[in-house]
Image: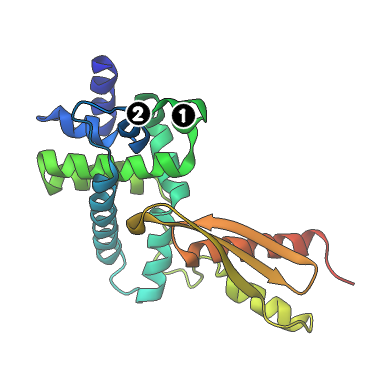
Amino acid sequence: MSADLEALEARIGHRFGTRELLVRALTHKSLTADRSTGDFRDNEQLEFLGDSILGFVISDCLVRRYPSYPEGKLSKLKAHLVSAARLYEVAKNLQLGDCLFLGKGEELSGGRAKKALLANAVEAVIAAVYLDGGMEPARALVEHRVIGDFAFPDENESASMTDYKSALQERAQSMGLPPPRYVIVREEGPEHHKIFTVEARLGREYMGQAKGLSKKSAGQEAARQILEALELTPPE
């Protein structure tokens, strides 16, 4: 496994002085549950710290890049960059799944490919880099791997990312229907890193359901699903 960790360090772009931090960042709580002896610490606290570092670095980058953007527009850009979907892509590019330390049950259930688990591991690795080397290598990791090739809109463009909930609201009005309804049907994960499942309904016929790291992002995706269904089967 040491060779795997060295290769991972190369992909991360940081050579750890205290490699135990990297090992901890890759250790899922399922492993600690399987071990009754030994000093095994999982990565949940590192996820908590990494989430804050990730949010700060991305916010700082966006404010510097778009000094004229209002808060709402910056928030939409940030939501995309810190989403579970984005972090999952980062984890796949880093090949984090191959390096995780999992308990037997999690291993057998396909934990190395689970989106939420891998997204959490990315945040834990960011925190490990910060604790080992300080803010600069952590910032470099976020800028290179998380922001990376993200397609930022041109600052002069008037159009921002689609607000699916507003678009669905307008569509409901045009169809003579009541406003869409949004219900949180499930909350999963620790308090500092919950995953929300939101269901959206339009009338009796249209329903969308999605997960997200925030109620807002999950609601947006659920609304997008209904809009897509409306395009495929337009009402008479």
| 140 up-or-down from 37: above or below | below
Structural distance between the alpha carbons of marks 1 and 2? 9 Å
Report the quarter where the C terminus lies: bottom right
Residue 166, given in percent of the width and then of the height, sits at 59, 76
44 lies left or right of 78: left
Residue 185, given in percent of the width and then of the height, sits at 58, 63
The residue pinned by badge 2 equals 34
Type of residue at label 1?
Answer: Gly
Residue 116, given in percent of the width and then of the height, sits at 45, 44
Report the quarter where the N terminus lies: top left
| 117 up-or-down from 235: above or below | above
Based on the displayed image, in which of its 4 quarters is residue 57 positioned? bottom left
Based on the displayed image, in which of its 4 quarters is residue 224 positioned? bottom right
Q: In the image shown, does 3 or 139 lie closer to the viewer? A: 3
145 lies left or right of 89: left
Q: Residue at x 26, y 36 (%)?
A: 25
Q: Secondary structure at mark 2?
A: helix
The residue pinned by badge 1 equals 105
Residue 45, given in percent of the width and then of the height, sits at 24, 47
Type of residue at label 2?
Answer: Asp
Q: Secondary structure at mark 1?
A: helix
Labels 1 & 2 near each other (Cβ < 8 A): yes
| 218 up-or-down from 115: above or below | below
Q: Is residue 13 at least partly visible in the picture?
A: no
